[in-house]
Amino acid sequence: MSTKPIFEVADLAVSFANSAGGPRIQAVAGVSMTVHANQTLAVVGESGCGKSVTAMSAMQLIPRPPGRFDRGSMLFEGRDLLSMTETEMLSIRGGKIAMIFQEPMTSLNPVYTIGDQILEAIYLHQEARGAEAEKLAIQALREVGIPNPEGRLRMYPHQFSGGMRQRVMIAMALACQPTLLLADEPTTALDVTIQAQILELLRTLQRSRGMGIMLITHNLGVVAENADVVCVMYAGRVVEYAKVFELFENPLHPYTRGLFNSIPGLHDRKDRLTTVEEVVLDPKQYTLPNPQLVPWWPDPPQGVRPETVAGRDEYVLVEVSPDRWVGCFNTAYAQSYPTRRPDLDFRRTDH
């Protein structure tokens, strides 16, 4: 039975002022996605595709100006985050929605102890004070596998290794029992052993708390091991959206195929790796189960671009087959094609 998502992004568009005085820069251009309880949605794409801007928008951490929410909504538990005041967001940010950033040393204050920084979140979002609050902070550190949490509580960020600092960030994020966790490349710059430990930790905490996770990454290995649903982004748009196993078994968009083809295989012997560009510039890649729908690409090969609807965005996200969405050129056929916004209430069972 389908359940209602805890987080629903609908046609989000975010732009930034151009310092050179030209037209605004569109960082996100009509993104739609959902996250359900106890589900991990992986948002995949190269640097600059709009992954982090989407997550930062949910926390209202986009500086305005120069940023601006052009259209769309981000519903959390039925309320639009984009229309909330700063006061209303304070009760949500860090409490019901938490975020883990890429580099913990830029997020942790070097002049405050770890304990002070975890307690700040507890004081803001829970009624606990004094010894009770400190007990919660110690418990948070213990849950993320930090030894001697009572002693570590009084240490400073520089006294922790990179992996331990990331665990502290997770402890801070989860200390207030959030419903939704936004994890923006939480294992960047960590070695593979620590990376695996951090991701396993997130899965364990998710199972025990029923938390929804939006996992932002460009590592397809991490996606294969951890995601339930995958959202592939390029140039601020969703180009493919599917259940993780279906996406890996049969990628439909040329860009997704390009990402997979550019990964070296353990048993494949190649003189050189295939680049994403080689795939997206191949006209044969622009085929879908429905031949009247053409995958969207900003600069497709010659002869691929169809005639699009005048006066409309040339891109539209279409459910090309049950539970599979692909960004397509907005032709008259695509405009009339029955579709819905991405929403997959799916969880893998192999963990």
Image (cartoon, helix red, strand yellow):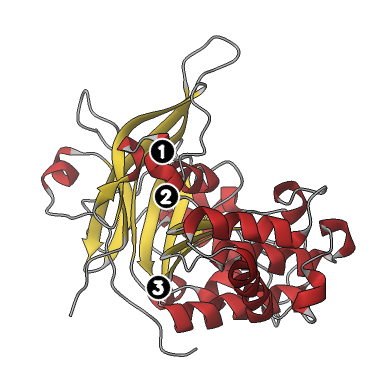
Task: Write down the residue under mark 3.
Answer: 39
Percent coordinates x, y for residue 118 in the rendering: 65, 60
276 or 229, which is in the foreground?
Answer: 229
Q: x, y percentage for residue 79?
A: 26, 49
- In the picture, which quadrant includes the N terminus? bottom left
Question: Height in image: 92 above or below 227?
Answer: above
Q: Please name the residue that numbered disc 1 is placed on.
A: 87
Tell me the amino acid under the disc marked 3.
Gln
The answer to whether residue 332 is left or right of residue 24 is left
Q: Nearer the viewer, residue 156 or 76?
A: 156
Residue positioned 84% across, 58% down in the render: 156
In percent of the image, x 37 and y 79: which residue is there? 347
Q: CA distance from mark 3 to mark 1?
A: 29 Å
Going by the numbered disc 1, the residue's amino acid type is Thr
Q: Residue at x 42, y 49 (%)?
A: 91
Q: Are marks 1 and 2 in contact (CB under 8 Å)?
A: yes
Task: Please name the residue shown 71% across and 57% down the image.
Answer: 116
Q: Amino acid at mark 2?
A: Ser
Residue 168, percent from left and from top: 70, 66
Is residue 281 visible in the rendered image? The answer is no
- Dot 3 or dot 2, earlier in sequence: 3
Badge 3 crowding class, 10 Å Cα cut-off, few under 14, some 14 to 19, many 20 or more, is many
Under circle 1, the secondary element is helix
Please state which of residues 84 and 274 is positioned toward the viewer in this rendering.
Answer: 84
The kind of secondary structure element at disc 3 is: loop
Using the image, determine if residue 333 lies above or below residue 98: above
Query: Disc 2 marks which residue?
Result: 91
Between the C-alphas of marks 1 and 2, the distance is 7 Å
Tell me how many marks there are: 3
